[in-house]
Amino acid sequence: MAAAGPEIVLLHGFTQTSASWRPVTDRLALGYSVAAIDLAGHGSAADLRLDLAADAARVAGSTTDDRPLLVGYSMGGRTALRLALDHPGAVRGLVLLGATAGIDDPDERAARRRADEELAARIEREGVAAFLPGWLAQPLFADLRPEPDDLAARLANSPEGLAASLRLAGTGTMDPPWWDELGDLTVPTLVVWGERDAKFAALGERLAAAIGAGADTAVVDGAGHAAHLEKPAAFARLIAGQLDRTSQR
């Protein structure tokens, strides 16, 4: 793609890599500069062991644009949100898909950490090839059919990298959760969820309400949790629209 205009930085979800974004980047207009970054424990960053805040700082220092539009899905959405909270001057705007600001109840957070530890240990014990089919068979991904290059890149992830990501950057590690910080966000934010993703529709509504006047919402029709991969053309249009809005400010 032509490296012109403001940069769009894409941050993937757990088990994914920068390659997962190809259906979206293929549909973005040539006038945009697009960078998909591997998060810690994944892809080219498989050897990095970073929590959400540290990985957010790494992303902030790796972009070619002083103020890119950050687009994050699930774990990538949490990373983008942390980056905007910690480094507000480094962000033009946000698009958050399937994101959360954390788990309120301390017992539920602890339970999530235990579950993630069990999952991390299983990945280390069984390997990625044995783990991934079960992960993708969850109801959360019922409508997802990964592209061959996406699936190959996921399978190339290391067990140690994925396990470290769960332990350091899982939702249970957001302790305390970030809900009370969201009112400090100063950048235009688009909160997105798939029409069929009831859990993250509720979380998305809550995110937008907590951010306040700077937040808009959008629903991807006919999509579930991984709406960017299920309906890449629709999601690419949302990204382009948000970049146009932020560029006019």
Image: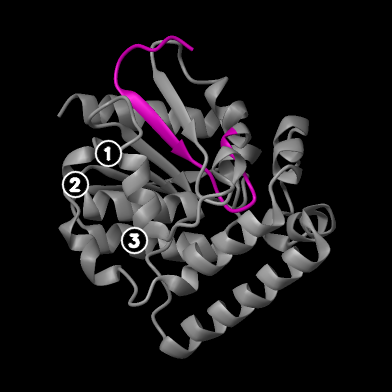
User: Mark 2–mark 1 contact, CB under 8 Å?
Assistant: no
Residue at 70 percent across and 38 percent down: it is: 153
Q: Which residue lies furthest to the front in this view?
A: 47
Q: In the rendered view, how is the structure colored?
A: one colour
Q: Nearer the viewer, residue 73 or 87?
A: 87
Q: What element carries label 2?
A: helix
Q: Does the magenta stretch include residue 238?
A: no
**Residue 122 visible in the snapshot:** yes
Q: Nearer the viewer, mark 3 or mark 2?
A: 2
Within 10 Å of the Cα at label 3, are there few (<14), some (14-19), or many (20+) other Cα atoms?
many
Disc on the earlier residue, 3 or 2? 2
CA distance for labels 3 and 2: 17 Å
What span is in magenta? 1-18
Q: Which of marks 1 and 3 is in front?
A: 1
Residue picked out by circle 3: 207
Q: What element carries label 3?
A: helix
CA distance for labels 2 and 1: 9 Å
Q: Is residue 223 above or below residue 61?
A: below
> In what quadrant of the picture does the C terminus appear?
top left
Residue picked out by circle 2: 88
Residue at 29 percent across and 31 percent down: it is: 68
Mark 1 is on which residue type? Gly
Q: Nearer the viewer, residue 71 or 142?
A: 71
Q: What element carries label 1?
A: strand
Within 10 Å of the Cα at label 1, are there few (<14), some (14-19), or many (20+) other Cα atoms?
many
Disc on the earlier residue, 2 or 1? 2
| Percent position of residue 205, x then y | 38, 61
Q: Is residue 18 above or below residue 168?
A: above
**Residue 146 visible in the snapshot:** no
Mark 2 is on which residue type? Pro
